[in-house]
Image (spheres, rainbow, N blue to C red):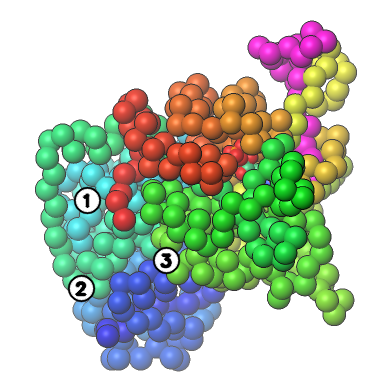
Amino acid sequence: MSLVHVIDVESGNLQSLTNAIEHLGFKVKLVKKADDFDVDKVMSLILPGVGNYGHFVDNLYIRGFEKPIKDYIASGKPIMGICVGFQTFFSTSEESSKSFGLGLIPGKLRKFDEKTKPVPEIGWNSCMASDQLFYGLDPYKRYYFVHSYAAILDEDLERKIRDDGWKIAKAKYGDEEFVAAIFKNNVFATQFHPEKSSVAGLEIIRNFLNQEHPVKSYSEQDKLLMENDYSNFGLTRRIVACLDVRANDQGDLVVTKGDQYDVREKDQGNDVRNLGKPVELAQRYYAQGADEITFLNITSFRDCPLKDTPMLEVLKRAAKTIFVPLTVGGGIKDIIDADGTKVPALEVASLYFQSGADKVSIGTDAVFAAEKFYSLGGKGDGSSPIETISKAYGAQAVVISVDPKRTYVSSPSETHNKTFKTKYPNAKGQEWCWYQCTVKGGRESRDIGVWELTKACEALGAGEVLLNCIDKDGSNSGYDLELIEHVKNAVSIPVIASSGAGNPKHFEEAFNNTQADACLGAGMFHRGEYTVNDVKKHLLQNGLKVRMDSI
Ligand code: 1PR
């Protein structure tokens, strides 16, 4: 079995890449120290990276990797960079102007223009069609991108790079074109994450490892269905399957689902509703085409020693066979362990990342962090989990999960939180409302609105909002569209609409009538009423582009 070396500077999720390579039948050896890097013995090398550019390249240099990597490249053997690994091949990045990459390709990475689209770019985009594509890159397939900075080249520089022998596969996010992948001789790199791009991404890794450049052909009808129409900044409509996980009264870890957060059966001895096993259900949704899977530990408010956290095992097992992004939430906070030691939230998150998570989602502590942000006059002090995790792993790895409930008032002057006039006044005829945030899974309400909360968390470094709605949870009555728009108007980071999905039309409604960046479903999938694929087919039939990879 061929051996693939992967450079490990402890940045982000190497576990997913390792899982993907092993899934393809290759063996992986992580190279943690430059001293262990014997250029003569390495036959295939991957340089993966996530998070902050400066943090990554500085780390690479401090650990002495610059020379062996350059020597390896000079030897002519194949190397592949992924995400920040791709960026490292360029000269530098606006993200950290004082840090320098390997400089194989001239140019400085720039931040996407956030006035015209949500930044980071999170989702499934395609490479633009070209007769110059390589390693089986397929303009009709979708790949998972997650980044704020990109190689956005001006015409002169692009020409210079091409003249220098590089082949460039471009992608378009909103109004900006950027380099999605690049290739010259033995050097290949992708801005997207092939290890998280399901079957299409695994094919790219396989082609690289086998050094093959296949080209696929499609019928005109398939092309029409699959081609990017750039109507949603270039991204497909992202469907997230969510699993609320907890132990039931027998002590088994189960996927459950509440009605307005109450997960106990109304009859049958008031047991915790048991809808299946977490890893099995996650695998099922992956096979059905879920673009992302979220696990929420919904009893995280109870203290639990870190080593006993059941979600670590769930994640490890799920990540072995599921090659789309995995988010884990619940209990991302400072923990006091069994022996009294304090484990910082960053360490808790690191364990999840090492187990296969791509993002962590923070609920209760996000509310506390936002409250502190305002008490400090609109700034953080660097200590909240949002700040520490975002700094180490990048904003794209930090989701805030919000559990708000609608609160009516007669006039905006009744609250200091941001209100709006609703189309649906309450029984008392009150027409103004705001959304009150809660902590501990809706058990405690706080005096902060979802508008204020999400704005503060974005400023602290969160990269995405998972927007639940207690009133709608488990109702099967559709998303709260007003809530989604309210939050979309507050922040520029992507927003995942959640709570209330009961059938495929609800997804269509949310995508057509709000600016939701993704839609999440739970109960309707768990009860087997609809599959993820049913939702996607419905969206496709109604003119909304989705990723349709069969597994
Ligand atoms: O506060 O950081 O420890 O995180 C706890 C996490 O657990 C939060 O993300 C919180 O939303 C979640 N949580 C806590 N209690 C519950 C509960 O249900 N009793 N679940 C809970 C939240 C909401 C969604 C759900 C959608 C879609 N569940 O995840 O899946 O509402 O459901 P539907 O499509 O069936 O309507 P921390």
Mark 1–mark 3 Cα distance, whole angstroms, equals: 23 Å
Q: How many numbered discs?
A: 3
Q: Quadrant of residue 213?
A: bottom left
Question: Are circles 2 and 3 on residues that touch, CB within 8 Å?
Answer: no
- Which corner quadrant holds the N terminus? bottom left
Q: Quadrant of residue 388?
A: bottom right
What is the residue that sits farthest to the top in this orientation? 429
Answer whether residue 245 is visible to the viewer in this image.
Answer: yes
Residue displayed at 66% across by 36% down: 473
The first of marks 1 and 2 along the sequence is: 1
Q: Which mark is residue 138?
A: 1
Is the CB–ligand 1 distance for label 1 below 8 Å?
A: no
Please, is residue 345 above or below residue 433 in the view?
Answer: below
Mark 1–mark 2 Cα distance, whole angstroms, equals: 17 Å
Residue to which mark 3 is pinned:
321
Q: Amino acid at mark 1?
A: Asp
Locate residue 532 relative to residue 421 in the image: left or right: left
Q: Amino acid at mark 3?
A: Thr
Mark 2–mark 3 Cα distance, whole angstroms, equals: 21 Å
Question: Are circles 1 and 2 on residues that touch, CB within 8 Å?
Answer: no
Q: For the residues carrying marks 2 and 3, which lies nearer the camera in this image?
A: 3
Q: Which mark is residue 36?
A: none
Residue to which mark 2 is pinned:
210
The first of marks 1 and 3 along the sequence is: 1
Q: For the residues carrying marks 1 and 3, which lies nearer the camera in this image?
A: 3
Which sits in the foreground, 178 or 140? Answer: 140
* 426 in magenta: yes
Residue displayed at 22% across by 66% down: 207
Magenta part of the protein: which range? 419-439
Q: Amino acid at mark 2?
A: Asn
Q: Judging from the image, what secondary structure is the residue with disc 3 in? A: helix
